[in-house]
Amino acid sequence: MSIKMRILIITAFFCATIFIAADNKFDQVNQKSSKQEIVLTGFNLTIDDIVLLANNKVPVRFDPEAWQRVKQSHHILLQAAKEGKSVYGLNRGVGLNKDKTLFEGNVLSQDAKAASIAFNQNNLRATCSAVGPALAENIVFSLMIIKLNSFIQGTTGAQPEVAELLLEFINRRIQPFIPSRGSIGEADITILAHIGLALMGEGNVLYQGEVIPASKALAINGLSPLVPLGKDSLSIMSSNAYSSALAALFIYDMERLLNKADLVFSLSLEGLDGNIAPFLEEVQNARPFEGQKQSAKNIRNALEGSSLWETSVTREPQDPLSFRSISQVHGTLRDLLKVAKQKFLLHLNSSDDNPLVVVTPRARGTTDQENRYYLKDNSGAVIPTANFETINWAIDFEALSIALSHLSHASTQRMLRLSSEKFTHLSRFLSPDSNAIVFGAIQKSFAALDAENKALSMPVSRDSVSVAGEIEDISTNLPLILQRIRKILDNLYYILGMELMHSSQAIDLRKKGNSSFRIGKRTHKLYHHYRMEVAFIEKDRPLSDDIERSYLFMSKKWPGELVPVD
């Protein structure tokens, strides 16, 4: 390989951190867990497991029962071919080529086996048509464990060797080169096919910090390349594992962002010297949406001991809506996230295979049409499905995108109010003296990011065209939805970080003007930790470094004492 080509490949691998911006890679990469290994059953994979493996080398192994299902499902698939059943992706082509017969009879007969291997190899090669940049390490290992979890459900019919080799890639931390774009959300075939390519010993991988041919990584580890057979190629790539990886990492980060957002808002309310009435328990019980009540409780807890509770000070009866309505804004996100997570976890530990291999049929069908898919001895079945369709959870993430843009907008509006002497009765732009500008120009930065978030939140699930010879004539664009929502989340680390700059500056100015002014116990801890990273602005200085430090502060894992208790 030429030096120029090697540089290009390495660049492609690592520029992924620019495209997939919300990886939250700062402190999470050092995440610690008491969990010593991950045992896959096919039905118990959690988001915490995915995040743990994504950022750490944690051993993974199969549950023995699950491994038996893998072998049994492959046997059922081979038997279906022996019995002359027409099976998509096994003895019939895929996509528009579903009308083409690949072979007849026993897959393991000499001619059929050669035809099957050739079809599977070519199917994987031809489907490797995704577009860069390359996926980051944490996403690659997330999607690989999700894909492995689906294999051992016993619904794919793939050779056991596929699951075994994928397990070795995970445990030996062999990272296939996988481009990030090219899926329309009806199974991420163009992306996941690159896993199959690496398993066959083709293409490149990242191993021990070096980009090397997949064949070399296999040889170093004493592993034999996969010889795909039967339905292996379709089993590897006909899955939403890439979308699932993006969703899992987003949910993990989003759950933590909401608590952080509650806490940052609480400090801003103190910076405004605002009215705490909208967050009182009695008010919340009058309209008891679950998420709204939780955010209001977090805010009350954060403000325990604050001067805002004092009745001797006359405050505005009605603050701007970006302050007054925030438990509703944050609460809506909590409610939407809860629903999205429930649906996602159901998807994560169930089958999106097509066709579906059924290892233990509950009952034989009542019609000839049903029975055509069952083996003669009723020991299994191979049935066409549309379980790769993602609309049942894609819409939830679009709704979350819209709700996140409202959080973004509210934070942006709060910073504008905090910069206005009309609302704070502090100095203009929170300047320490009349000659300083301080937070004048920064408004353009957070306004630009908020505008970007608004654009990123626009629904795209309806933007589809007919592909695969007009067979795939609807789609959800789920990967695009998830790529965009992760970018919104990353932008929010900046926006909330800049809000923290404003609220902390306002707190300092209030303390200078009123020595008896107190902030809450939890907001004080936030303020204290933040001031260790970003200092009070005594006089005008370049703010880009402060913004970046604030972003890092927001995106990293916080000490437990900072986060409000749910």
Image (cartoon, helix red, strand yellow):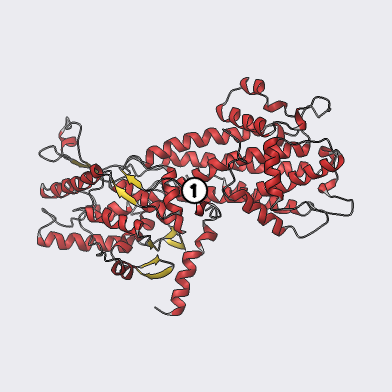
Residue nearer the viewer, 547 or 130: 547
Q: Is residue 388 visible?
A: yes
Residue located 32% across and 71% down the image: 216
Q: Answer left or right for 539 relative to 177.
A: right
Relative to 485, residue 342 above or below = above
Count every numbered label the image shows and give the total: 1
Quarter where residue 561 is shown: top right
Q: Answer left or right for 459 relative to 546.
A: left
Residue 442 point in image, percent of width and height: 74, 53
Relative to 424, residue 498 above or below = below
Amino acid at the residue labelled 1: Leu
Relative to 12, residue 383 above or below = above
Of the 4 image quadrants, the one containing the C terminus is top right
Q: Answer left or right for 506 relative to 395.
A: right
Give the structural element (helix, strand or loop) at label 1: helix
Quarter where residue 40 is shown: top left
Q: Is residue 94 visible?
A: no
Residue located 44% across and 76% down the image: 5
Residue located 61% across and 21% down the image: 285
Q: Residue furthest right?
A: 434
Residue nearer the viewer, 24 or 344: 24
Residue nearer the viewer, 267 or 203: 267
Relative to 180, residue 41 above or below = above
Residue 316 point in image, percent of width and height: 81, 29
Of the 4 image quadrants, the one containing the N terminus is bottom left
Number of residues whose C-alpha sits closer than 10 Å to that of mark 1, classed few (under 14), some (14–19) or many (20 or more): many
Circle 1 residue: 482
Q: Residue furthest bottom?
A: 2
Residue 119 point in image, percent of width and height: 23, 61
Residue 470 point in image, percent of width and height: 35, 51
Residue located 39% across and 57% down the image: 191
